[in-house]
Image (spheres, helix red, strand yellow):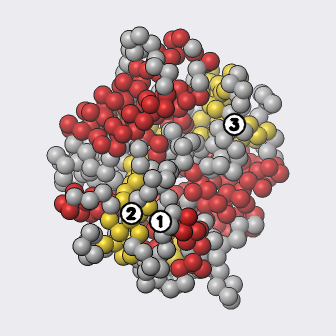
Amino acid sequence: MNDPQLDLLVLGSGVSGLSAAVRAADTHRMRVGVLTKAELPQSTTRWAQGGVAAVLNQDPDSTDLHLADTLSAGAGLCDTEAVRVLVDEGPDRVLDLIALGAAFDRDPDGTLQLAREGGHSQPRIVHAGGAATGAEVERALVVAVQRGASAVYEHHFAVDLIVEGGRCCGVTAIDPDGEPLEVRARNVLITTGGAGQLYAITTNPTEATGDGIAMALRAGVAVADIEFIQFHPTALHHEAMPRPLLSEALRGHGALLLDARGERFVDELQPRDVVSRAELEVMVTQGIDHVYLDARHLEDFAARFPTIDTALREVGLDATVDLLPVAPAAHYTCGGIVSDLDGASSLPGLWVAGEASCTGVHGANRLASNSLLEGMVFGPRAVEAIERGQVGPSATGAMRAVLGGDTEGAPVAAGTIGGRMLARPEPVAPAAGGPSGDWVAVRDRLQRAMSLGAGVVRDTASLAEAQAAADDAAAEVAAVALTEGVAAPRAAFEVANLADVARALVHTADERAESRGAHSRRDHPDTDPDQGHRLVLV
């Protein structure tokens, strides 16, 4: 299946990658390959519950209000130009998805149902199956990709980028039998998602190991905002992993958060970082490991939220009778590979979209339900740039922090954010005595250390402990690289990627001596106006 004539190789099969693949194959007749570590329909997208935020009705909502809500949630680090692209082009991308066959929930008269979620001033969230939007979006896109893609590499694991002559021209990978191969293409689009598996408690599937971001770090591609990990405040407190997610739409529909005394303690419709920190404070103060979501008063719960109702009943809970135990869980990687407004990274031939990217849309904290929309908008934008012959990035969007930024992180233009450049952490020496070979245990130790040291709230001491654990994991990986090379098991490569992203995250979190958005420091509780810039790893 190795095809040197591919115009575009898409890494990952979430909404951003599949949207790009459909645009490339159907609209521009490109030869497109999609490489995914699992099956085509198995990505983080399918876990998305809440919906897609888009202004499809101008009264009383507007794209200006959507932009303002996004900027507010982003805590001063959104790129205004990137957000404007998102809110203006988003509605058309939703209509494109409907044209492909995506069935969103409608009222009896055919009008799209709109929900409101935390941080949104208006109801503007379109959804499917109550809280099964991601699965429906993915279903529609997978059908289209299977129809138009030139090559699909399922159960293939991308190991590293191939860079020749200063340009990305493919990836080295491992096939389902563990054999190495090269998959070459004129352009590579990273849409591999985030790194929720950095943490012991997460809503992300086991595949979310930061692979694309780690490959970019190793290739010297600019990465930014990686310290901003969003924790979802209403993950079900249950032994299941990934944690079942109780959608933001529940709170938008009127569900309340209660402490151990049965009292409300926070405005449920504030942005996720605010709600998660409020929960943590209550949990610490009252000596508990969860709080409660009260949805008992919601009408027609099973009809409105059938997916959540089924998941709750499977673990013995009835939302009409029981208080639902919830606690924060790692949910979304707000930063990633820096891109311009067309998805171009700092390496020519390498493009990025979705959760693996840093477009400037999310800033320090993603607004609820902007994630699917970002993938639907910026994945196709990368294809359009490739089609018109763009080579390398332009000084637009978050890329201004790289091409126009300076070492002090000063703003480079009105509405844009400057960048402070940091060298990425140096490689560590291989572990003495070689790798243990127990990659499940190595991964578990890293996840627990990151949860304790670089979770909802951090400080200098906790970050140092997380760094030590990340260095230990990296040393194990370095040892196996010496002894087994490409013959190492996939589990080792996933630990390598988690360790690389963890070390980058801890490095930038330690440098950002303030609290802003999803990054909260006990030892620096205030937001520092002088740190209103991106920390860019190069």
Mark 1 or mark 3, earlier in chain: 3
The residue located at (46%, 46%) in the rendering is: 196
Which kind of residue does numbered mark 1 sit on?
Leu
In the drawing, does residue 168 fall left or right of residue 65? right
The residue located at (21%, 38%) in the rendering is: 460
Please state which of residues 15 and 189 is positioned toward the viewer in this rendering: 15
> How far apart in space, not on screen, are marks 1 and 3 (Cα)?
29 Å
Q: Say which mark, if any, is on residue 326.
A: 2
Please state which of residues 11 and 432 is positioned toward the viewer in this rendering: 432
Q: Quadrant of the C terminus?
A: top left
Which kind of residue does numbered mark 3 sit on?
His
Mark 3 or mark 2, earlier in chain: 3
> How far apart in space, not on screen, are marks 2 and 1 (Cα)?
8 Å
Q: Are marks 2 and 1 in contact (CB under 8 Å)?
A: yes
Please tell me how crowded label 2 is: few (under 14), some (14-19), or many (20+) other residues with Cα within 10 Å. Answer: many
Local SS, label 3: loop
Residue that badge 3 annotates:
155
Residue found at the very far left of the displayed protein: 523
The residue located at (44%, 61%) in the rendering is: 236
Q: Is residue 531 above or below residue 173?
A: below
Residue 330 percent location from the top left of the image: 41, 51
